[in-house]
Image (cartoon, rainbow, N blue to C red):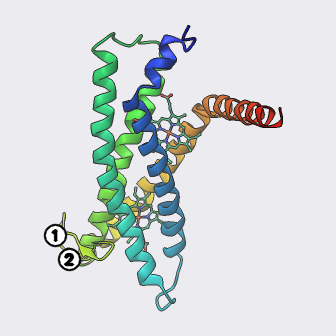
Amino acid sequence: MNSVPVVRKARLNSAFKRLMSIHWLMAACYLVLFVTGSGMARLTRGTPFRSELYDFHKSMGALVVALLTWRILVLLQVWWRKYTKHLPKFTPEWQRKFFLHTLLYLFMFAVPVSGFFFSNSYRSNNVRLFGLTLPDLFPQNSDLVDLGRSIHFWIAYIFLVFIILHTLQQWKVVRANWRRFQCFVMNWKQSKSI
Ligand code: HEM
Ligand code: HEM
């Protein structure tokens, strides 16, 4: 008999697995963005590879916007499969998670847009996706450069605070997965030694 509980079975559906694959891919991109962003902002003009680092950061920023679009489409697919069968139980735990995930999505959108605002205000045709010049989302306006820098700075670091909160909220899940993985490795080793 299949012993996988129904709830876990639903979680293992292919759309949810795809959503989590994009989740980890994007989490790796955000790590790169935070490291490059905070590093390059502290470099003085004339430092070798400074402008290449800026270009790389902007390219990664544009890439996560594309990944976000894909993620939202997969999320809609997960919701469709899940909530057309039964509505969620609106427990306080569910509401907390929903609220935090919604905020994370808003930041995933707002942080790169603020990066575009900052870069386009400084100079037009200033954002390239690994060499391909992207159209401007905002007009060039040197009066708004400092405002753009401030907005990008603040919302990027507030986003980081929410990522940390989310990581703490998911810690139990991560620990349980880690234990499951350790059991898997132990069983595999035992089966090899027989
Ligand atoms: C780096 C930035 C991160 C962002 C923006 C983020 C955002 C999200 C969002 C919005 C979801 C809901 C599912 C979805 O729509 O994709 C989610 C789920 C999840 N996240 Fe993250 N996450 C990040 C990093 C992490 C990290 C570092 C961990 C590890 C502790 C983690 C663990 C999880 C887990 C286990 C789930 C599944 C929750 C569930 O079972 O419903 N996330 N994350
Ligand atoms: C989710 C995506 C992004 C994240 C998490 C992110 C994060 C950051 C962080 C943490 C900094 C350092 C701020 C500081 O300490 O002063 C930074 C700087 C910067 N970011 Fe982003 N960024 C993202 C997307 C973008 C995009 C799409 C662009 C442009 C199109 C961009 C352009 C810049 C620029 C030009 C700086 C340098 C600021 C300075 O010189 O003061 N970023 N970013």
- Whether the residue carrying mark 2 lies under 8 Å from ligand 2 is answered with no
Viewer-proximal residue among 29 and 178: 178
Residue at x 54%, y 72% (from the top left corner):
39
Give above or below for 162 relative to 2: below
Question: Looking at the image, which residue sits at the far top?
Answer: 1
Disc ID at residue 131: none
**Label 1 environment density (alpha carbons within 10 Å; few <14, some 14–19, many ≥20):** some
Viewer-proximal residue among 49 and 156: 49
Task: Give the foreground label among 2 and 1.
Answer: 2
* Residue that numbered label 1 is attached to: 139
In the image, taking residue 62 as reference, residue 93 lies left or right, namely right
Residue at x 34%, y 19% (from the top left corner):
82
Residue type for callout 2:
Ser
Quarter the N terminus occupies: top right
Would you say the residues marked 2 and 1 are in contact, meaning their CB atoms lie under 8 Å apart?
Answer: yes
Give above or below for 28 relative to 11: below
Viewer-proximal residue among 182 and 45: 182
Which type of secondary structure does the marked residue at label 2 adopt?
loop
Which type of secondary structure does the marked residue at label 1 adopt?
loop
* Residue 85 in picture, x, y percent from top left: 31, 11
* Residue 57 in picture, x, y percent from top left: 42, 69
* Residue that numbered label 2 is attached to: 124
* Residue 160 in picture, x, y percent from top left: 51, 50
Question: Looking at the image, which residue sits at the far right?
Answer: 193
Give above or below for 142 relative to 69: below
Residue type for callout 1:
Pro
